């Protein structure tokens, strides 16, 4: 179980982020259409047909997250888990908030800046339950991730992560997610997250297969998760994107599970290129900044400077990757470990 075996996960993370990026640049309308000064479907008639499904990269993220969180929490205390998550999520997130807000103030005709009280509550990453406007459009997924972390931490990590406890957690959460559809209780839906639970649970079970080998119970959990996940993704499609092909959505969900399963089974040992480490490191800051800041770059390059659509698209993606590298190098690497150390409890003197 060498480290090279898991480098493919870093590549999958970047693939998921690029899927979402293409959706935001070429697969949707709204604000980005104003930056392009036209519909992306007209500017990129072929690309847009695939890019409209890019938002399902988020589901791939959730499967990977289940796998990685189970792996990274093994043998750790609840305090260790808390500190690692805070140090991993917040430094780049705070910088992204500042950058997007600054750009919104400089170019309000692309994206309007939020009020000061809304910006301040965005610093907590709890703006959605507080009913405040989001500075980062993609941060709704962070709220989903946070709820997963809390559930897993309180019900599994607190007592110590073991095979038995992960299996029990996965089975109980699956049952709760299914039963949640029979109630209109909003709080219960917020906690159980029935529309996203199967993706995380599938990732958890795939890590068990990676760590302990194949067994019928773990694969049964994966199969059940996939069956429920394709249903949730398809229902979400009809609710928000009725003109897309449900068969394509099922295929995307299947490929997401299959890709992480390939990592779990060791079929990706050959993917040992060092650049995959960099790809994984860039994924989170890239995901944070690419949407709104990308729209600003598209506006400047295409509408203000007159650059053609395809070069604009390529340069925008590259510029966001470059910015992500800067955030990783000068924010995450130096300040993440410092924040983690600062969060360690202070030993109080006895007596």
Image (tube, rainbow, N blue to C red):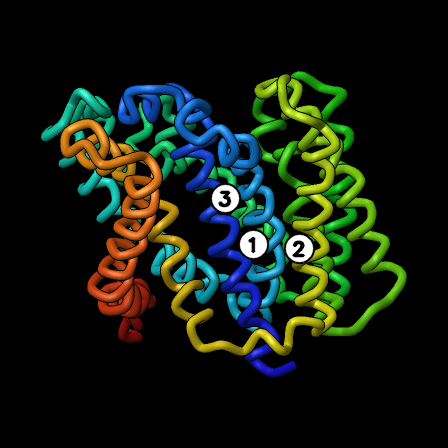
Given residues 300 and 193, the one toward you in this image is: 300
Q: Quadrant of residue 5?
A: bottom right
Q: Residues within 10 Å of mark 2 (few under 14, many from 20)?
A: many
Residue 181 screen position, x and y as percent: 73, 24
Left or right side of 173 for 286: left
C-alpha separation, residue under disc 3 versus residue under disc 2: 19 Å
Q: Residue, x 39% and y 34% (percent of image)?
A: 25
Residue wearing tag 2: 203
Report the disc number at residue 65: 1
Report helix, strand or loop for mark 2. helix
Query: Of residues 282 and 178, which is closer to you in this image?
Result: 282
What is the x, y in percent for residue 248? 69, 35
Foreground disc of the pair 3, 2: 3
Q: Quadrant of the N terminus?
A: bottom right
Check disc 3 and report the residue beneath it. 19
Q: Work out whether 326 lies above or below 99.
A: below
Q: CA distance from mark 1 to mark 3?
A: 16 Å
Dot placed on the residue nearer the N-terminal end, 1 or 3: 3
Residue 9, position as x, y percentages in the image? 56, 64
Q: Residue at x 86, y 53 (%)?
A: 220
Q: Secondary structure at mark 1?
A: helix
* Residue at x 63% of width, y 17% of height: 242
Report, in whole angstroms, how far the alpha carbon at label 2 lies from the one at label 1. Answer: 7 Å
Q: Position of residue 233 (x, y in %)?
A: 67, 32
User: Pointers 2 and 1 in contact (CB under 8 A)?
Assistant: yes
Residue furthest right in the image: 216
Q: Secondary structure at mark 3?
A: helix
In the picture, the disc for residue 22 is none
Can residue 148 be seen at all in this image of the molecule? yes
């Amino acid at each position: 179980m060498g480290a090279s075996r898991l480098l493919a996960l870093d590549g999958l993370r970047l693939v998921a982020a690029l899927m979402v990026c293409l959706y935001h640049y070429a697969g949707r309308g709204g604000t980005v259409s104003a930056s392009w000064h036209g519909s992306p479907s007209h500017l990129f008639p072929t690309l847009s047909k695939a890019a409209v499904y890019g938002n399902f990269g988020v589901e791939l993220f959730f499967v990977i997250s289940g796998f990685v969180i189970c792996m990274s929490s093994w043998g750790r205390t609840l305090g260790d888990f808390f500190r690692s998550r805070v140090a991993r999520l917040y430094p780049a997130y705070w910088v992204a908030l500042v950058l997007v807000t600054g750009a919104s103030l400089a170019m309000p005709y692309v994206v309007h800046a939020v009020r000061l009280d809304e910006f301040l509550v965005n610093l907590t990453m709890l703006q959605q339950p507080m009913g405040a406007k989001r500075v980062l459009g993609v941060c709704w997924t962070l709220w989903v991730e946070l709820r997963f972390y809390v559930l897993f931490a309180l019900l599994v990590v607190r007592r110590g992560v073991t095979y038995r406890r992960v299996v029990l957690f996965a089975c109980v959460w699956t049952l709760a997610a299914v039963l949640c559809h029979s109630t209109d209780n909003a709080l219960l839906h917020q906690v159980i997250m029935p529309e996203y639970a199967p993706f995380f649970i599938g990732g958890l079970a795939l890590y068990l297969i990676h760590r302990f080998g194949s067994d019928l119970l773990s694969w049964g959990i994966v199969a059940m998760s996939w069956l429920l996940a394709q249903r949730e993704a398809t229902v979400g499609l009809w609710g928000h994107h009725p003109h897309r092909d449900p068969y394509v959505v099922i295929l995307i969900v299947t490929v997401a599970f299959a890709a992480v399963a390939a990592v779990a089974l060791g079929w990706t040992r050959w993917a040992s290129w060092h650049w995959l480490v960099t790809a994984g490191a860039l994924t989170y800051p890239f995901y944070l900044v690419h949407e709104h800041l990308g729209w600003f770059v598209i506006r400047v390059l295409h509408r203000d400077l007159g650059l053609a659509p395809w070069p604009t698209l390529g340069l925008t993606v590259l510029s966001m990757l470059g910015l992500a590298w800067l955030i990783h190098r000068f924010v995450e690497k130096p300040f993440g470990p410092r924040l983690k150390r600062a969060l360690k409890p202070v030993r109080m003197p006895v007596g």
